[in-house]
Image (tube, rainbow, N blue to C red):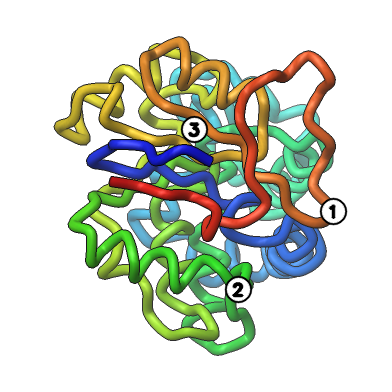
Amino acid sequence: MNPLTVQAILLDIEGTTSSIAFVYDVMFPFARQHVLEFLKSNRQRPNVQEAIEQLAIDAGYANTQAWSVATASSDKSSNESNAQPSHSFLAEHTLSLMDSDSKSTGLKALQGLIWQSGFESGELRSHLFEDVWPSLERWSRQSKAIGIYSSGSIVAQKLFFGHTPQGDLRPYFNRHYDTTIGPKRDSASYARIAVEFGFAPDQILFLSDVAGELEAATAAGMHAIAVVRPANVALPESYSGPRIESFEELILS
């Protein structure tokens, strides 16, 4: 691969820095298993309440109270005195969103908080491909700014990279972005990231395993390279952009 001159690298997580299998076989089942007990124990925390409020908005309601009123007939355990969805209703709704692989911002926020409890207790530890940590170290020595753009919440991203087999890798990252900045297949999201990141789009390299995301980044003016990892979904035949199997293949100047 020819040398590429950029000042910043923007990374996807799932299928790019870490195995899809880890996300689907470890992290998602952990959230499923613990969502109900987590809500029962932590619902009054402000950040948990914010995630629930976002779930209501994602479902098309103005706020949690409006959501509760509208779904009262299907939520037999709701607290009618303050019109709040019950723990069981929220847990079932969360599992339904997970079943449909929803990118709901509220879902991602709640998952991130559940994963936080797992990482902090030591029950969870992240998976990274072997080339990731040496590449972060190399890019850092080259004074490249490094950012993350993932559908997982920023809380989840920081937890993920804060609890890896190589230790806490959070100091390598300058910026974190999730779907609060926009959908990952929308070129406007990448344009907004470039402005917030502080670099012209053509000075940013985006790495992902998803063709639609790569095409959106390219449309915004970024460089984009597909990352092909074991067990990833194959790129469509129509995708003609550059691709690599390891970050070590990148030559950046």
Q: CA distance from mark 1 to mark 2?
A: 15 Å
Viewed as shown, does residue 228 lie left or right of 150?
Answer: right
Secondary structure, mark 2, is loop
Q: Which residue is mark 2?
A: 130
Earlier-in-chain disc, 1 versus 2 = 2
Is there a contact, CB below 8 Å, between mark 2 and mark 3?
no
Q: Position of residue 64 (x, y in %)?
A: 49, 32
Viewed as shown, does residue 202 lie left or right of 200?
Answer: right
Q: Nearer the viewer, residue 27 or 104?
A: 27
Q: Which residue is mark 3?
A: 64
Q: Nearer the viewer, residue 156 or 39?
A: 156
| Tag 3: amino acid | Thr
Q: Position of residue 115 (x, y in %)?
A: 56, 67
Vertical placement of residue 55 versus 32, above or below: above
Nearer the observer, disc 2 or disc 3? 2
Q: CA distance from mark 2 to mark 3?
A: 43 Å
| Tag 2: amino acid | Glu
Residue 195, by quadrant, is top left
Q: Tag 2: Cα neighbours inside 10 Å, few (<14), some, or many (≥20)?
A: few
Q: What residue is shown at x 29% (from left), y 58% (from top)? A: 173
Q: Tag 1: Cα neighbours inside 10 Å, few (<14), some, or many (≥20)?
A: few
Vertical placement of residue 108 versus 37, above or below: above
Q: What residue is shown at x 48% (from left), y 58% (from top)? A: 156
Earlier-in-chain disc, 3 versus 1 = 3
Q: What residue is shown at x 39% (from left), y 20% (from top)? A: 189
Q: What residue is shown at x 46% (from left), y 10% (from top)? A: 219
Q: Which residue is mark 1?
A: 231
Vertical placement of residue 53 versus 189, above or below: below
**Residue 82 seen in this snapshot:** no
Nearer the observer, disc 1 or disc 2? 2
| Tag 1: amino acid | Ala
